Image (cartoon, rainbow, N blue to C red):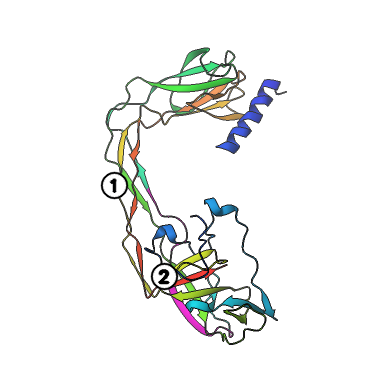
């Protein structure tokens, strides 16, 4: 039977685990951006509001239907209705007979990783446990742990409601090896755009719109414009495409510095033998439990990233066109 204290901490641990590019919204007319770079791009099929302040904006309404299997699409200011084929599809529908296979802005986000390792010293040593009702200042005790993740018995019976741990390395590293930069730059994507649909039928549509064939399940109704432009209102997904692409992206340098073994991880368990995990203890004062009976300590490397690498450069598209989808 699990004690009430254990049950309480299980709930708290669960709560802890829970807590652990603006919408491209512009005016009705096309606007030439000052500079088309990654900050203004939204990869094809990715919502311009994802992960940004405007992410709570509801998705656009479906395009107005103007006839059987038809929709209204903008044709003003140089915008042309097109159908974008789904991934892997290469055959354009007969209603959009003009096929154009192009390169497009990548899906995903470019990142540059940096790994650091110590040149000297070690993170081996004891771990101090501080505890208290609220501020972890009522008392402390020291555990001697191997630092390699081995399950070790530990008695936390004197711990109050809060606890934290602090590595106490005997000989902490004072220098780091040359950092290793790992690029993760997303490749340009491939997109097939189908055009050539007649735009003379405007019945049932607003001004500056045409009634065009609706895309089937293998495609999506979008609009395209020669050059690089902001998308009209109601079109949240913006992609730059081109007949070719020049890639000048790279990763800058990074620096590492000794971190006094701050990267150590201490996992705590309700029973001996490490069968029921409470999660990981923090180096800041947080919830604790006197029911802890075993721990696993993995010592830190001893060196951390002090200056992360930046992604530099950009993609330049030949004969660029802007693709906007709802």
Which residues make up the magenta segment? 94-112
Residue at 51%, 12% (x, y): give it: 139
At label 2, counting other C-alpha atoms closer than 10 Å, the crowd grade (few under 14, some 14-19, many 20 or more) is many
Residue 80 in view, yes or no: no
Quadrant that contains the C terminus: bottom right
- Residue 107 is one of the magenta-drawn residues: yes
Image quadrant where residue 246 sits: bottom left
Image quadrant where residue 174 sits: top left
Q: Position of residue 208 (x, y in %)?
A: 57, 79
At label 1, counting other C-alpha atoms closer than 10 Å, the crowd grade (few under 14, some 14-19, many 20 or more) is some
Q: Is residue 250 left or right of residue 87?
A: left
- Secondary structure of the residue carrying tag 1 is loop
Which is more foreground, mark 1 or mark 2?
2
Q: Position of residue 262 (x, y in %)?
A: 40, 29
Q: Position of residue 105 (x, y in %)?
A: 43, 65
Q: Say which residue label 2 marks.
A: 228
Q: Nearer the viewer, residue 161 or 26?
A: 26
- Residue 203 is one of the magenta-drawn residues: no
Q: Say which residue label 1 marks.
A: 253
């Amino acid at each position: 039977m699990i004690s009430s204290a254990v049950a309480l901490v299980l709930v708290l641990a669960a709560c802890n685990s829970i807590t652990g590019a603006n919408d491209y919204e512009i005016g009705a007319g096309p606007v030439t951006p000052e500079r088309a770079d990654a900050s203004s791009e939204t990869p094809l099929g990715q919502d311009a509001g994802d992960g940004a302040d405007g992410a709570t904006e509801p998705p656009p309404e479906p395009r107005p239907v103007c006839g059987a299997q038809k929709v209204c699409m903008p044709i003003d200011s140089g915008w042309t209705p097109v159908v974008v084929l789904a991934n892997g599809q290469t055959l354009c529908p007969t209603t959009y007979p003009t096929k154009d296979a192009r390169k497009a802005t990548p899906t995903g986000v470019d990142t540059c990783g940096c790994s650091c390792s110590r040149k000297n010293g070690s993170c081996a040593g004891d771990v101090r446990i501080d505890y208290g009702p609220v501020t972890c200042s009522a008392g402390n005790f020291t555990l001697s742990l191997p630092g390699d993740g081995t399950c070790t018995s530990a008695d936390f019976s004197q711990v109050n409601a809060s606890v934290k741990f602090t590595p106490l390395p005997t000989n902490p590293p004072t220098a780091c090896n040359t950092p290793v930069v790992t690029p993760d730059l997303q490749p340009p994507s491939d997109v097939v755009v189908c055009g050539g649909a007649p735009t003379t039928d405007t019945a049932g549509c607003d001004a500056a719109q045409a009634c065009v064939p609706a895309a089937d399940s293998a495609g999506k109704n979008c609009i395209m414009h020669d050059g690089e432009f902001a998308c009209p209102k109601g079109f949240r997904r913006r992609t730059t495409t081109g007949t070719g692409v020049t890639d000048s992206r790279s990763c800058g340098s990074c620096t590492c510095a000794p971190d006094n073994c701050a990267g150590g991880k201490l996992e705590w368990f309700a029973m001996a033998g490490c069968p029921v995990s409470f999660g990981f203890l923090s180096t800041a004062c947080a919830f604790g439990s006197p029911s802890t009976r075993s721990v696993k300590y993995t010592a830190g490397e001893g060196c951390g990233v002090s200056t992360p690498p930046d992604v530099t450069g950009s993609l330049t598209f030949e004969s660029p066109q802007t693709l906007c989808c709802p």
